[in-house]
Amino acid sequence: MEIVSDPRDMQAVSLAWRRLNRRIALVPTMGFFHDGHLSLMRYGREHGDRLVVSLFVNPAQFGPAEDLNRYPRDLERDEARAREAGVDVLYIPAAADMYPEGYQTYVTVEDLSRPMCGASRPGHFRGVATVVLKLFHQVLPHLAIFGEKDYQQLAVIKRLVADLNVPVEVAGRPIVREADGLALSSRNSYLSPEERRSALVLFQALTRARDLAASGEAEAEKILSEVTRIIGSTPGTRLDYAVLVDPRTLTNVDIIRGSARLAMAAWVGGTRLIDNMLLEVN
Ligand code: AMP
């Protein structure tokens, strides 16, 4: 496995692969790898000839009061896990190379960036869309793989790629969970043992909603009030938002016809966690 940090070197490596007709897969990450990241790498390994994993904690997607400076990092362990996963290049650009002095170009995917996490984290998806487009230009992948864990992010990137004619295939992959249901996240490392127990309430609320829908409840209001009640009854947790949306447009759904995505964010102590699930009405 090679470690590359200069964007021009990355581009040169990818251009050489492209001349040899190699299919390049990219998994963009912020590091502190867990099994969710590894599942994306496995998919990339299977669907590409060359696998690049980028590791960049992108300042442009963090608000001023957010956790940029304390975001968990363990480069040595990440290197070892990437090597084991069969990664060809671990791409670790420096913030000063990504956003050099004078940098002023940003991409905004307008409507999809506004609700949900976009409402709680102004500017977040502008930072995400910008860095992902930059990574695409640096790594020149044929295939880019993202997790459904960040469901709105995936929708934003699919829209970006369609709207700007970016020649990259985008794959969304299922959420990987702990044995008890908690969605894996680098931010879970912030949780105290007690908070870790409370954090399970997100999954419990989602599965309760899924069961309601499966047994015929199609009214968003009923489902969302149950979700709100469940989160509200767990001490130390606070719901940021819970929405039932069209899986593609992310517009609110009043009555589920067939299926819809339930997405939520909740604070567990000082940690903001997100999760989502597909609801199907029978
Ligand atoms: P991050 O390092 O948190 O920015 O995540 C990098 C990629 O991994 C994103 O596409 C995430 O959606 C994905 N990811 C994070 N957690 C999970 C998970 N539990 N299951 C599947 N994919 C995940």
Image (cartoon, grey):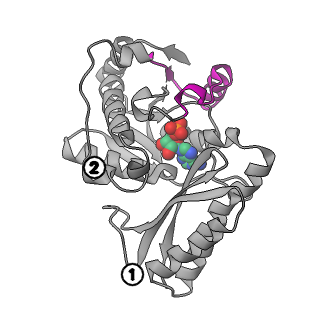
Is the CB atom of the residue marked by disc 2 within 8 angstroms of ligand 1's nearest atom?
A: no
Q: Residues within 10 Å of mark 1 (few under 14, many from 20)?
A: some
Instruction: Examine the rendering and report whether any part of residue 72 can be seen.
Output: yes
Tag 1: amino acid: Ile
Alpha carbon of mark 1 to alpha carbon of mark 2: how far?
25 Å
**Rendered location of residue 184, percent (x, y):** 63, 47
Residue 49: percent from the left, percent from the top? 44, 32
Figure label count: 2
Q: Is residue 152 magenta?
A: no
Closest to the observer: 21 or 172? Answer: 172
Residue found 24% across the figure and 38% down from its top:
166
| Residue ID for mark 2 | 159
Q: In the rendered structure, which segment of residues is drawn in magenta? A: 67-94
Q: Amino acid at mark 2?
A: Arg
- Residue beneath the point at 34% across and 45% down: 157
Q: List the residue tagged with mark 1.
A: 255
